[in-house]
């Protein structure tokens, strides 16, 4: 991986981001809205996938994912939604407020709304 977040259609890199936290996922959402590629046909690679990233990717209808690092909560969520995934390293948890915040949430729309609000507040604070 050359970037922190990459998206492929077939074998072609069609989107990437070097941003951090969950910002690449919301950048990716804007890319998806272009409608040029069906989400179900895309392959996403992400440096770190915890439950937040897993929930957003499921919300965006992504079906094939690779994580360099995957948290146990992220793995459980992907399994529950029958998403095809691979990873390089599985870790118990990501020590992040976002992972803790979502630990008891299972609805992707609720997670999306919460994460979008936090991302907007964080971005506006910069």
Image (cartoon, grey):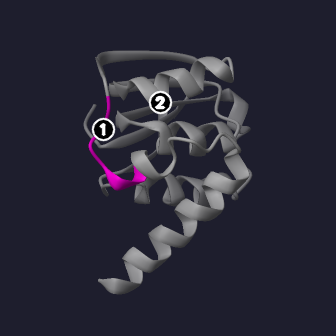
Near-viewer residue (42 or 111): 111
Label 1 element class: loop
Is 38 situated above or below 28?
Answer: above
Residue 51 at least partly seen: yes
Residue 25 x, y percent position in the rendering? 49, 52
The residue at which mark 2 appears reads as: 74
State if disc 2 and disc 1 touch (CB < 8 Å).
yes
Near-viewer residue (102 or 119): 102
The residue at which mark 1 appears reads as: 94
Residues rendered magenta in the picture = 93-98
Is 79 situated above or below 49?
Answer: above
Residue 10 at least partly seen: no
Residue 110 x, y percent position in the rendering? 68, 55
Is 95 situated above or below 11?
Answer: below
In which quadrant of the rendered image does the N terminus lie? Answer: top left
Seen at 58% across and 41% down, the residue is: 55
Seen at 51% across and 25% down, the residue is: 65
Which secondary structure dominates the residues rendered in magenta?
Answer: loop
Going from N to C along the chain, the mark reached first, 1 or 2, is 2
Question: Seen in the image, is 126 located left or right of residue 26?
Answer: left
**Magenta span contains residue 97:** yes
Seen at 63% across and 56% down, the residue is: 112
In which quadrant of the rendered image does the C terminus lie? Answer: bottom left
Question: Seen in the image, is 73 located left or right of residue 33?
Answer: left
Question: Seen in the image, is 95 located left or right of residue 67?
Answer: left
Near-viewer residue (70 or 34): 70
**Magenta span contains residue 84:** no
Seen at 42% across and 54% down, the residue is: 22
Rendering quarter of residue 48: top left
């Amino acid at each position: 991986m050359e970037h922190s977040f990459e998206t492929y259609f077939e074998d072609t890199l069609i989107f990437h981001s070097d941003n951090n936290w969950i910002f690449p996922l919301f950048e990716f959402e804007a890319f998806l809205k272009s409608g040029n590629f069906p989400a179900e046909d895309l392959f996403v690679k992400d440096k770190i996938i915890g439950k937040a990233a897993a929930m957003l990717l499921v919300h965006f209808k992504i079906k094939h994912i690779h994580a360099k690092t995957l948290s146990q909560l992220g793995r459980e969520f992907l399994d529950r939604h029958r998403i095809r995934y691979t990873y390089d390293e599985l870790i118990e948890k990501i020590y992040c407020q976002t992972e803790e915040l979502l630990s008891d949430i299972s609805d992707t729309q609720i997670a999306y709304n919460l994460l979008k609000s936090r991302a907007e507040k964080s971005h506006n604070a910069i």
